[in-house]
Amino acid sequence: MFTAALIYILAVISPGPNFIIVSRFSSLGSVTTGLGATLGICTVGVFFSTISLLGLAALLHEYPAFSKVATLCGSAYLLYIAYSIIKSVLAKNTGTAESTTPGVTSFAKAYRVGVITNISNMKTIAFMISIYAGFLSSPRTDLEKVLVVMLCSTLEVIWYSLVSLLFGQGPIKALFLKYTRQIDVGLAVFLVAFSLNNAIPVLIASR
């Protein structure tokens, strides 16, 4: 159980779209909106952890097209976020700043973005399935299954909550705001590269 949790949290803390969303909401908005995104991300984490233990791997093996379609849809959404960030940068340059991207917004919107961002990342889902497949390689009781999901989910909540609190602090917010344009461009480039890295292998394999 603890091995699965350790691998899970190592995957969670690796930089990716979830980290970008939480840190940006906290830095340009507030700790509250960062926690909203955190809750959205962790809601999806609990959902996929649960269905992974209930046999999601078998379902994806039976319907491989679902994984491909989900990967492409997820990549498209990440590209949309990158587009929105660049659009926000250009709007700031022309003095017409918009709030279409993670920034000053509501807890509910942050939660929604967190959910969509995490649910669109099929690589994370595939990794989660592999973690639980290893966990299920030995006979497990229902209690053990519940406990491992609770442990992994708790670690995920703690990590992204810490990210929210860290990036919501005055000095880091000030640094983020001072270099918002440069940081946003870098984040957008990362999201484009990440989404293309997910989508291109699927498109090539489909030929």
Image (tube, rainbow, N blue to C red):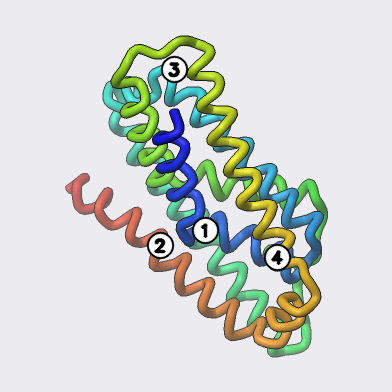
Which is nearer the eye, 151 or 71? 151
Instruction: Tell me: 22 left or right of 207.
Output: right
CB-based contact (under 8 Å), mark 2 and mark 1: yes
Looking at the rendered structure, the secondary structure element under dot 3 is loop
Assess disc 1: are there few (<14), some (14-19) or many (≥20) residues with their C-alpha within 10 Å of its C-alpha: many
**Would you identify the image quadrant in which residue 63 lies?**
top left
Q: Amino acid at mark 3?
A: Leu
**Along the horizontal axis of the image, is 137 left or right of 74?**
left
Tag 2 secondary structure: helix
* Callout 4: SS: helix
Looking at the rendered structure, the kind of residue marked 4 is Leu
Please state which of the two labelled residues, at mark 4 or mark 2, is closer to the viewer: 4
* Residue that mark 1 sits on: 17
- Residues at marks 2 and 3, CA–CA distance in whole angstroms: 29 Å
Say which mark, if any, is on residue 166.
4
Q: Position of residue 40 (x, y in %)?
A: 66, 43
On residue 194, which mark appears?
2
Q: Give the class, few, some or many, for how many residues have Cα within 10 Å of label 4's Cα (few <14, many ≥20).
A: some
Secondary element under disc 1, as helix, strand or loop, is helix
Q: Which mark is residue 138?
A: none
